[in-house]
Amino acid sequence: MQVTGYVKALEKVDFSISERETIGIVGESGCGKSTLGKTLVKIHEPTAGSIIYFDPNGKSYDITNGLTKEVRSTFRKDVQMIFQNPYDSLDPRMTIRDTILEPIQTHKLFKNLKDQDRYVRELLSKVGLDPDYGKRYPHEFSGGQRQRIAIARSISVNPRLLICDEPTSALDVSVQSQIINLLKQIQREHNMAFIFISHNLDVVYHMSDRILVMYLGNIVESAPSRAIFDNPTHPYTQALMSAIPNWNPRERKLGTVKLEGEPPSPINPPTGCPFHPRCEFRMDICARAKPEPTEISSGHFCACHLRDLTIDSSRSAG
Amino acid sequence: MESTKKRVMQSFFKHRLGVFGLIVLIIMYLLVIFADFIAPYNFATTHTNFVYGKPSKISYRDRDGKWIGPHIYEMKKSRDPITYQVIFTQDTSKIVPIKFFVRGEEYKFLGLFKSDLHLFGVEQTPDRAMLLLFGADRFGRDVFSRVLVGGRVSMTVGLLGTFLSVFIGAIVGALSGFYGGKIDILIQRFIELLRSFPRIPLWLALAVIVPPSWPSTWVYFGIVTVLSLIGWMGVARVIRGLVLSLKEKEFVLAARVIGVSDMKLVTKHLIPNTLSYLIVVSTLSIPGMILGESSISFLGLGIKEPMTSWGLLLKQAQSLSELEAHPWLMIPGIFIMVAVLSFNFVGDALRDAVDPYRTVEKL
C-alpha cells in the first residue's frame, strides 16, 4: 500500500463548551463536522491539537492522546453521542431492552435487576415509546422510533454532554420536528450540554445558543445564534444564509450571494484562506495568509481578511 | 429477528436438493448413532470361515418357487484347485431365514450397557452362515457393520472439526479485522504462509505428532485437532472482511462511545452479526473435514485399528488386485460420497436462504 496523501479533515477548530450550553455546528458535506464529533467522543484520535475535559468535580484532564484508566469511565459516562443514521446505529441482533441496557450495565448503574428494568421502561416512555417495546428488535421500528431508541440509550447514563451528529438528517420532515422537540425537552429536564451538528441551518438555529460555521476543516465564523442570523459576516456564512429557502412560498427565491464550484479537496487544501478560491471578495492576501479569527462584536468571531481590513481602516480613520 | 428466522426457514424448505440432503443426513446420523444395534455383527469380531466373504445373496423363494420370506443359505468353503483361491458355494439345502430382533454377538450400546440384540440378522452361528450385506474383509469382519460404526468417526469428525475450526477462525478473524494495523498484517501473512503449504504433507507432518501409543479415542481427537488447525484459515479470512465492514457501523461506534470493552464489542456485537455467515461456512466446510479425515486414514496416519472410519475401510482397497478380487471393499467410498454431497446440498440451500438479495429476487 502506498500513501499518496493525507486528508486533513480538521485543521483549525478552536472552541469550548460549558455546562447546559448548546453549540450548533453547520457546514456543507465533507467539511469535517462529523469528524469533529467523532474526535470529541474519542472514536477518532487527533494527530495534533488538544482536547481538555473537566470532570464533574471540575478537575481537568488532557484527553488528546487517548483516555487514561483514571478518566475513561467518567468520560464515557459523561459524553454520549447520537448518530446520523438510526437504521445503522442499533445492533440488529439485540432487543431494544438490551440495547438500552448496554450503557447501564457497562457503567453498573444498578445493583437491583428490578430497578434496572423499571428504569428501562421509564426511559422508553420518556422518549415517547411504549414501555413494552423493549422485547422487540430494531427492524420492527420506523426511522423516527429508532432515533428515539438511540436517544433513550444515550441519555440512560445521564451524560453531561450529548453530541448529536445530524440526528434528523435521515428522517422524514414530519418526524424531524418531533425529534428536535424531544431533544429540547430532554435538555431542559436533564441540564445537558449539547453539540448539535447539522447542515440544516434552521434546525441548528432552533436548537443552539452559539453557532460555529465550518468550512474545509476550519471554523470560519462563530457567534451567538441570533448574531449569526442577523449579521452573517464571513462570505461563506452569507452564502449559506442566502441558500435557506423562505418559508413563505410567495417569496420563495434564494438570496443573491451565489457560490461557485465545489469545495476543494481536503487532500490538497488551498493555501491561505481555505475559502478564497470560491470567494467573491477575494483579494491578493487571501491566497497567501490564513486569516485569524477576530472578534467583531462581543462573542462574534470571524476569520476573514476582509473584516481585518475593515477594522484596520476604521481604526486608521478614527 | 423472528421474521428473519422464518424467512430463512421458508426459503430453505423451498430448496429441494437441500431438503433431500437434510433428510439423507438425518437418516445417516440415525444409522450411525444406533450403529451397534442396527449392525448384524460386532464390527471388530473376526470370522475365520468368511475371510473375504462375498456379499450374501438374499433369496425369497425356496427351490420349488414357494415364497418363504427373505433368507440366505449356508456356505460351503472350498479352494480352486489351480489358483488356491477360496470359493464359497451355496448349500441350498440349508435355509437360514433373516429375522428381526435376533440375539447375536455381544456389543456395548453407545459404550453404556451390554446387549446382544440386533435389529436384524440370522440366528445361525457365524461359522456356518453369515448375513453379509456388503461382504467381509480379510479378517472376515462384516463390512456393513464396519461401515456403520466407521461412520461414527467420519460423520462426527466433520462436526467437531468444523466447530473447532470455525471457533478458532471466528476469533482470529475478528481480532485481525478489529484491531487492524500490524496485528492484522501479521495474522494475514501467517495465514498465507500456512495456506501456501501443500495440504497433504502438512497433514502428514501434523499427524505424525499424534503418538502411536495413544488409545484410539485420543487419536480421534488428535485427528480432529489436526484437521481444524488447517481448516480455520478460510473462516478467519471471511470473518476478518466482515468485521472490517461491521466495525465502521454506527452501532459499533455507539458501543465504543458507551465505553464497552473491546472483548465485549467483539463477542456481543461483531461475532453475533456474522452468525449467519458462520453457519453457512460451517455446513460448507464439513465435507472438507470428512474428506480430510478419509485422506489421512487412507494414508494410514489417522484412525487406527480396531477403531474404524470410512477412510480406514477404504485403505483396504488400496491395491488394484485387491479391488479386482473383492470389489465390495469400495462400498465405504459410496458412503463418503453421499455424506459429502448431502452436506454440500444443505450448505448451498442454507447459503441461498440467508442471502437476503436472493429472497428479494424470488419475491
Image (spheres, coloured by chain):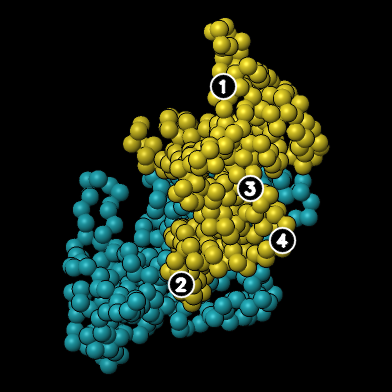
Chain colours: A cyan, B yellow
- C-alpha gap between disc 3 and disc 2: 33 Å
Q: Which mark is residue B58?
A: 1
Picture residue at 76% right of the left edge, 49% below the top: A113
Picture residue at 26% right of the left edge, 76% below the top: A275
Which label sits in the foreground, 3 or 2?
3
Residue type beneath disc 1: Ile
Residue carrying label 4: B214
Please tell me whether mark 1 sits on a helix, a strand or a loop: loop
Looking at the rendering, in which quadrant would you find the C terminus of chain A? bottom left
Q: What is the crowding at mark 1: few (fewer than 14 residues within 10 Å), some, or many (at least 20)?
A: some
- C-alpha gap between disc 1 and disc 2: 55 Å
Residue carrying label 3: B308
Give the mark nearer the N terminus: 4 vs 2.
2
Residue carrying label 2: B193
Query: Where does the image place residue A131, in percent across and percent down from the top left?
Result: 63, 40
Identify the subunit bearing mark 3: B
- C-alpha gap between disc 1 and disc 3: 27 Å
Give the mark nearer the N terminus: 1 vs 4.
1
Whether the residues at callouts 1 and 4 have beta carbons within 8 Å, the answer is no
Residue type beneath disc 2: Leu
Q: Which residue lies furthest to the right in this view?
A: B113
Whether the residues at callouts 4 and 2 have beta carbons within 8 Å, the answer is no
Q: Residue furthest front?
A: B81
Please tell me whether mark 4 sits on a helix, a strand or a loop: loop
Residue A75 lies, with reference to residue A311, above or below; the image says above
